[in-house]
Amino acid sequence: MPITLPIEDEANDLLNRDPFALLTAMLLDQQVPLERAFAAPRELADRLGRGLDPGELAAYDPDALVEVFSRKPALHRYPKSMAARVQTLARAISDDYDGDAAAVWKGATTGAELYRRVAALPGFGEQKAKIFVALLGKRLDVRPEGWREAAGSYGEEGTHRSVADIVDEESLGKVRSFKQEMKAAAKSAKTAKTAKTAKTAKTAKPAKTAKTAKPEPPNPTGAAG
């Protein structure tokens, strides 16, 4: 089943046929709406006037690339830092995979190996790597043995946890709701932990201090001995 996000058809087409565009979208998917991140590669290609070639992007003038990202509407909430991250990713694909982004998953024979390869890419932490493994398996039929296990909960069938589970507006809404629930739960847990720490500090008994000897009263007669 191909990628059919609720974005423009041209943006979906690029994600389905260009592996580096797909990696770029996944990289950009943070601190912006999901659909904005996955539409960005097509907008970037339009602004560059050509396809997203990792080798060309790796050699692109960094300041010029920031300018491309920053043109209104900006491709990301943080155009400068994300332009740098995309260029770093392009260098990694160019250097480590000879410019072939698809080689990241084509050469993986197990889910664990696939996860390790994706997680090793610049900008891909544990969670992002698991989501990408799930996206490859659920939407692009990249399914080496153990891919669901490697993707963790994101690989489960019938869930709505990430972009891997989105096929239309309805499923996008379900994923949004899940993320909001997780964010609320994390906030609640943090608040409870803070309150518990404060309570512990308040009820802790202060350390006992050593008693000091009381001074002897003065001799009322002033006599010695």
Image: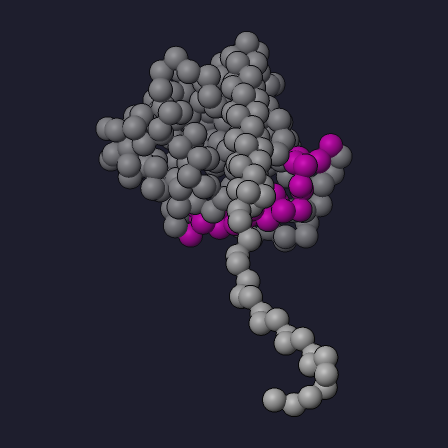
Where in the figure is residue 187, as x and y percent of width and height? 57, 30
Depth order, front residue of 81/43? 81
Where in the figure is residue 140, as x and y percent of width and height? 38, 23
Asked where in the image residue 199 lies, by quadrant, the reply is: top right
Depth order, front residue of 95/219? 219
Q: Which residues are magenta?
A: 73-95
Q: Please identify the residue farthest to the bottom as the structure is shown.
A: 224
Quadrant location of the N terminus in the rendered image: top left
Seen in the picture, residue 16 relative to 21 is either above or below; the reply is above
Q: Main SS of the magenta segment?
A: helix
Depth order, front residue of 194/210? 210
Is the image coloured rainbow, by chain, by secondary structure, or in one colour? one colour
User: Residue at 58% across / 43% down in the picture?
Assistant: 202
User: Residue at 55% across / 42% down in the picture?
Assistant: 203
Q: Is residue 11 left or right of residue 143?
A: right
Where in the figure is residue 213, as x and y percent of width and height? 58, 72
